[in-house]
Image (cartoon, rainbow, N blue to C red):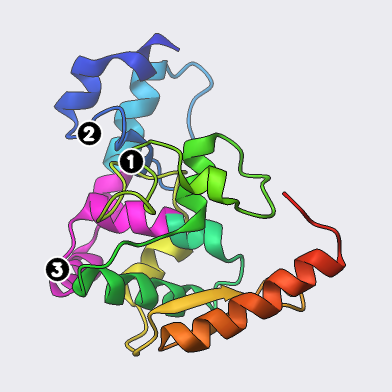
Amino acid sequence: MLAFRDTALVDSLGFNAQTFPAMFIPNTYELYWTVTAKGFIVRMHKEYQQFWDRNRTEKLQRSGLSQLEVSALAAIVDEETRFNSEKPRVAGVYVNRLKKGMKLQADPTVKFAVGNFNIKRVLHAHLAVASPYNTYKNYGLPPGPIRIPSIAGIDAVLNYEKHEYIYFCANADFSGKHAFAKTLAQHNANAAKYRRALNRNKIWR
């Protein structure tokens, strides 16, 4: 659809090609089947503005992040865990890293940069990929969301858990949940357990 590539339209709504996915809030909407692509985009922008109500805006101001930064981080959190109960803790890790001036080193951004979200084992070759989205090579948040963030992901960032964790990795039981750590030594021990589990299951990539 040409309307989605209309840079003048996208710019007029306060977005660019990288940040545009943040405008689409996943929800159920009623539209006429005759709606044009431009009409759909304008409607989604209106829904986006309504989504950022007073409550979320107040939390946004306290977070120190912009709307687009929250969306970029929420997209990472969504890719890190499918458990909504775990998302605020994951978000808290990344907020802690941002505050400390550390690289995010988020595996989902590497998968996005490589162009393959099905990667089960991130390798050194993946980490070396040159891309503004690769948070192993670049400081700060990527230039835009790596996917359309969920409402749960956005709210997890706005309500991130305050803790001292700096690291996390997947649990060795493949439950989809994570082991969190405050020190690099703790994290390395957790990561070693996970790598051994990958090896036992012959998951090489």
Question: Mark 3 and mark 2: span between their CA atoms?
Answer: 20 Å
Image quadrant where residue 11 sits: top left
What's the amino acid at mark 2? Phe
Residue at (29% x, 58% y) in the render? 70
In the rendered image of this protein, does residue 136 appear above or below residue 37?
A: below
Q: Which of the numbered marks, if any, corresponds to residue 15?
A: 2
What's the amino acid at mark 1? Met
Q: Which of marks 1 and 3 precedes in the sequence?
A: 1
- Image coords of residue 143 (percent x, y): 28, 41
In the rendered image of this protein, does residue 97 appear above or below residue 28?
A: below
Which residue is disc 3 drawn over? 64
Tell me the element at label 1: helix
Residue segment shown in magenta: 47-75
- Image coords of residue 96 (percent x, y): 29, 77
Which residue is disc 1 drawn over? 23
Residue at (55% x, 72% y) in the render? 84
Judged by depth in the image, the label closer to the viewer, 3 or 2, is 3
Does any portion of residue 178 appear in the rendered image?
no
Residue at (33% x, 44% y) in the render? 47
